[in-house]
Each structure stands twice: as C-alpha cells, then as structure tokens.
Amino acid sequence: MHFDSYIPTRIIFGRGRLEELAALPLPGKKALIVITNGKSMRNLGYLDRVIRLLEQNGAAVVVFDKILPNPVVAHVMEAAELARNENCDFIIGLGGGSAIDSAKSIALMIKNSGTYWDYVKRVKKITEPVLPIIAIPTTAGTGTEVDPWTVITNPDTGEKIGFGDDVLFPKLAIVDSELMTSVPQRLTAYQGMDAFFHAVEGYLACVAQPLSDILAIETIRLVAEFLPQAVKDGNNLQAREQMAWAATAAGLVESTSSCISEHSMEHALSAFYPELPHGAGLVALSVPYFTHLLKKEPEKVSVRYLEMGRAMGEEGNSPEIFIAALKKLIDKVGLSDLRLSDWGIKPDEAERLAANSYEAMGALYELDPVRLQDDDTVQIFREAIMRRSGE
Amino acid sequence: MHFDSYIPTRIIFGRGRLEELAALPLPGKKALIVITNGKSMRNLGYLDRVIRLLEQNGAAVVVFDKILPNPVVAHVMEAAELARNENCDFIIGLGGGSAIDSAKSIALMIKNSGTYWDYVKRVKKITEPVLPIIAIPTTAGTGTEVDPWTVITNPDTGEKIGFGDDVLFPKLAIVDSELMTSVPQRLTAYQGMDAFFHAVEGYLACVAQPLSDILAIETIRLVAEFLPQAVKDGNNLQAREQMAWAATAAGLVESTSSCISEHSMEHALSAFYPELPHGAGLVALSVPYFTHLLKKEPEKVSVRYLEMGRAMGEEGNSPEIFIAALKKLIDKVGLSDLRLSDWGIKPDEAERLAANSYEAMGALYELDPVRLQDDDTVQIFREAIMRRSGE
C-alpha cells in the first residue's frame, strides 16, 4: 500500500442545485463561459440560465461558443486570448466533456505563454497561475468535473491526448442531474459507458489504490443497475441522478488511479475518426480488449474481473463473469449492434491505429495489469473492427 | 441525493514515506512542530527525524512541546504567540489527535485576532489566513490528518468541543504506518475503535452521502478484520498499514458526513474525566447507545445496522447482528472488561453528563438517525456507567 491521493474539487451535488450559482462565493468577477458549437446549451436554456445566475451573483460574463465535439488546440488558444482581452478572471465549462476539458485548457493558457501543445508534450512547464475553473456538467460520463484531465486534439499532428496536472482540478463542480434529462438515448448510453470504463480501467490499473477501488466498484455497480434505466427512460430522475453520481465517482477514480491502454486505443480511433463518439469507441473495443487481457495473463486480472462481475450482479466463480456481464450491459443499453465499420473504419487500419495509440498515449500501457505487445494491440483493434460490440 | 463534498488534503500514504519530507515542496520556510508533552516523540526518535528531514529540505524549525493529551486553549494561544514571534510560516502536527488538532487551532490563531474560544463558539469569524498545516499521524485513530476538525478543551468552562472549518484541512497528510508500530496494545485498541465509531456514526448520520457511505463501510470492514490483529501483535505491519488506511478513510467520512451524538456524549465524559481516553469512552458508551437507537426506532436504523453487521463478517438478516458484531469486536480487541467506574465515574452523574453533552456539542444530536430526548441520553449514560463494555 503505497499511494498518493489528491481530489480537491468541491462538489455540489443534487437536483436543481444549479440555482445556487446565484449566491455561492465566486472565485472572480468576470467569467468566460465555454460551450460547444452545438445549439443545445442555448436551446435548452442552460446558457441563459447560467448567465442570469452569474449576473445575479454580481459577475460579468463573456461566452466562447466554438468548441468542437473533439476540441482542438486552435480553439483553446483563441478562447484564451478572448479571456485575456476581456479580463476574465474565472472560467466556466458548461456542457459535456468537450466544454469542461476546454475550460481547463483555456484556464491554463490565459497566463502561461506559448502554445498549448507545448504543455501537453511536456516541452514547457506551467509556471503561471491557472484561472479558477467551475465545471457544470450536463452529461453523465466524463467525470472531468472532478479530475485534472483534459483531452484536446491536435489536427496538425493527428493526436488526441489526455493531459493532466494538479492545477487543472476544477475549484467547484456543480453536478445537477436535472440538466441531464435532455441527453438523447444513444448519447446517454455512450456517456454512461465512458464512466463505466473509467471505473473498470481504474480498478485494473497497476496504480489502483484503496480509495479508487471502492469508488470504482461503486461506479460499476451503479452503471450496471441504472444506465439501462436511464437509457430506457431519459426522464427517470432517479436513474439520471444515480448515473450523475456514478460518472462523478468515476472521475474521482481517474483522479486517484488511472485509465489504461483501452483509453489510448480509443483516442487513436477518435483521432482518425473525430465523428466517432468516445463512448462508442470504448464499447466497440471493450469485449475484445478485456477478453484479450484475461486470455493473455489470467492470473493478473482474475480476482478483479470476478469482483467486477459480482458488482454487476453476475453470479459464479469464474473471471469470465465480468465479460458476460459486460456483454449483457452493452446489450441492455442498446449498443450490441454497434460496429466500427459504420464509421468507415477498416480492419487493415489496425496497425496504423496501434502505432498512433502508442505515440500519443503510450504512457497508459505502462499502467496495464497485463503487458501488451504491439501485436496484441493490433489484434485487439482488428477484432474490434470486425465484430459487433455485443459479440 | 443532495450533498456537498470537499476533501482537499493531499495524502501521501505508505511505509517509510516520512522520508519524503526531505524533498517534497514545503509550504513555507520555517515550521512550528507541535507535539504533546509526553516523551514518546523524542524517545522514538520521530521528532529528531522530522527536524532533520525539514532541515535537509531547507526549512528552519521551532518546536512547541507542551500539548496535553486533551489539549487546552491556553496552549493553543501560547504556541500561536511563539509561532508569531518566531515568524513560522507553516505548522506541523506530529503525533496523535492531540498534536494534530492543536496544530490546526494554532495555525488558525497566528493571524486571526482574539481568543481561540471565540472562534469555537462562533462569536468571531475567521477573517485572516490560516497557516498551511502538515499532519504526520503516529497513531491510527482520529483521522484528523484529513479532516477539518479540531477538539480543544476549555478548562474554565468545562467544555471539550469539536470545531471545524474548511480552512482547517491540512494541506498535506503523511500517513506512514511504520510510525505506528510503537503504539502500546491498549492504546492501539482505543484509537482503532475511535476510527471505527467515526465510520459507524458517519454511516448513520442523517447527512451521510454516497462517498461517506462507501468509505464508512470500508473502514468498518477493515477495523473488524485488522484491529484485532494489530492489537494482538503491534509489529504486524500489514495490520498496522490496513488500520492506518482505515483511520484515514474514517477521517474522510468525518469530512463528508459527520459524527452523531455518541461523540457529544463521549466529549462530556472526557471533559469531566480528562484521563479517560476518547476511544475508551466511546467503547463504554457504544453498546448501550447503539442498542438504544435500535430499540427506540428500529425502522430508522435497521437497514444500515444490517449492512454494518455484514461488513463485519456477521451473518443473518436481523439488525441485531451489528450489536452482536460490535460486542465481538470489543472482546477481540481486549476491551470487554472496560468499565467507566475505573475512572471514578458514577451512575448519579448521568444527568450532569447529559446536560454537558447538549451544551457543548448539542448540534450533533440534530444529525442522529433517531431523535434522542433528554431522558434517552441520561439512560444511555447510566447504562454505560453501570455495565462492562462487552455486555
């Protein structure tokens, strides 16, 4: 037992609690609100509501609304310049992972010089303060509201890289599940499965620790129980609420343990296929990936597979129950027909994807419970591309 | 589900990790090290070691070594003045709860004016910064290394009160179980049971939340398994390590949920009988207290008693299994013969103790799962004073 823990984000959790933004102590006087280029934050009235609440609280507001579903470096730099010019002194990420991750990267670039990618590539060190970040998630998935990670894509290099630093933890996360009822069925499933794999990977990572273990098992149990309900009926407030907590708990897993190479592999997929939702990529990879780990070195993962399978309600004494429970879950959330070929991904790309996954996020392979070689990775990609997700 | 979470303390956990104090980034240049007036920190070499490590790290050091086992206001004020005069810019609490709690209260009083008790009684508000605190626990019990609480006694008013504020979280907790092997058998049992009751009370409190629940069940499970081993053989490093994590986890429970009136009642006992160890008081109160809650309103506690009993390895479907498991645990850690009468406490003091428990820490009664009236409290005290703890 040898571990470090640091999860400093203050969490305000509960239905309707977004309203507290009107009265809680703000970390500054002028906010940059970061949202994606979609229409949802406006159409759902969330943007107007956040602006009104901040103004009630005496803060001025500037909006940056160009973030892409897979956020790119250029927008981070553009928004940071806007915030600098407008003298914003705190940043609000409103939306899913794209908006909140971008808020973190923007907060970093306002006072730190140079190009964002220099920090991602660890060419430059963070020397200046990062502006305080408030995260307001409207999806139950990434957990970014309570973790120090931000995933930005560099189209020039074809890399999609997760970057993290202790100074990137949001100061405050307002997790209000009422903001999540409008997420469409398919996205609910993708996002919930993203949270699920954060927990599964964090539970298997060789840097897992007691705190991440109990949070991971909690998440795995909750997703298995409540994600099918939230997918079936998006207005099931209890299921939305449990999934909101599950996603946040999985964010705490990412802060105390780590993702493993499944995430490196998915980032390679969505670096080349930006239209592929992150959760869809993970689901497509998952059965071949976790089956491969178990076949390659069963003694390294059996005990934990068994625990996860049981947390998902599966009975039995074999580690295979985790794979069985995973397939059932994929089926229950309506994703068993998902095929990577629907996004145009072909089996002969497996080598190129494997190479990218090592180049961009090779470090996560070091944390795997089972050491994967090049040909393991290629084989997992190939199987994932050739099969339906439920198989 | 409606909760706030904030557990910002950085935790460095592991055997031998105290050594990292020589190289980790310190929050200042001159430390006030706070220890109790006993000889153990000197005799065990811990004080010299911490001084050497800090000096290696380039920091100057001043020592305050007058803290009593039940720390008093006068020493908080005296140490704060010393730190001010010596220009100390961070505070280290080295030892058990007395030293670390005092470090927090001292850190508060260095820049904030007036008397400490004014803050405890909420007569004055904290307006000035609290100096950064590093907690180095040498016992597995209080959890104070990761919580915002500090318990100081005011001999003038006969009150022993827990006071907390977000600014009192230590910046850093170094939890090195190798520092705990020297704790004598009886104290190991008292301290471990203190952690146990933090978890049990936090699990039953009406402000319990999902994060505190999983941490509480983890603590309860670990204490039931490993405290008897640590008591039996103080050099059992695995048991010491698991208990170190259990106590820290229970501190996180205190930070995310709360103690309930069992703690108010124990503080009344040890306000009048400062020689009574806190853990001994809790153990003596526990069987009558938890039995009384169950008898008074079984529907309010049954489900959680059952969960706790099961976490302790007890089988069955009745909430009574928790009481049975508690009695077994008290027996296994060698405390079944403990009697409050050994400290001179008499049954006819029950009314006075009950009154004090309401005056000093009445707020915790508001968080009880079962609302206790005056005569409930008196009855629990009377039973606790008349019985052996194991009964």
Image: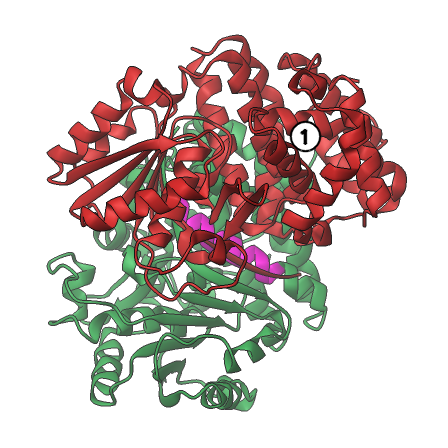
Chain colours: A green, B red
- Residue named by callout 1: B311
Quarter of the image for the N terminus of chain A: give it: top left
Rendered view: A1 above or below A348: above
- The total of numbered circles placed on residues is 1
Residue at 24 percent across and 55 percent down: it is A360
**Residue B350 makes an appearance in the image:** yes
- Frontmost residue, A301 versus B309: B309
- Frontmost residue, A70 versus A62: A62
Circle 1: is it few (<14), some (14-19), or many (20+) Cα within 10 Å? many
Residue at 54 percent across and 9 percent down: it is B232
- Picture quarter containing residue B324? top right
Magenta span includes A257? yes
**What amino acid is labelled 1 in the image?**
Ala
Give the residue furthest to the top.
B233
Residue at 40 percent across and 16 percent down: it is B181
- Frontmost residue, B57 versus B100: B100
Magenta span includes B179? no
- Picture quarter containing residue B189? top right
Look at the image and give the residue range highlighted in magenta.
Answer: A243-259
Return the x and y of residue B156 as percentages of the image width and height: 54, 43
- Picture quarter containing residue A184? bottom right
Residue at 73 percent across and 36 percent down: it is B307
Residue A34 as seen in the image, left or right of residue B363:
left
Residue B164 as seen in the image, left or right of residue B267:
left
Return the x and y of residue B102 as percentages of the image width and height: 40, 41
Residue A55 as seen in the image, left or right of residue B308:
left
Q: Which secondary structure type mostly characterizes the magenta part of the structure?
A: helix
Residue B110 as seen in the image, left or right of residue A295:
left
Rendered view: A126 above or below B245: below
**Residue A289 makes an appearance in the image:** no
Q: Chain of mark 1?
A: B
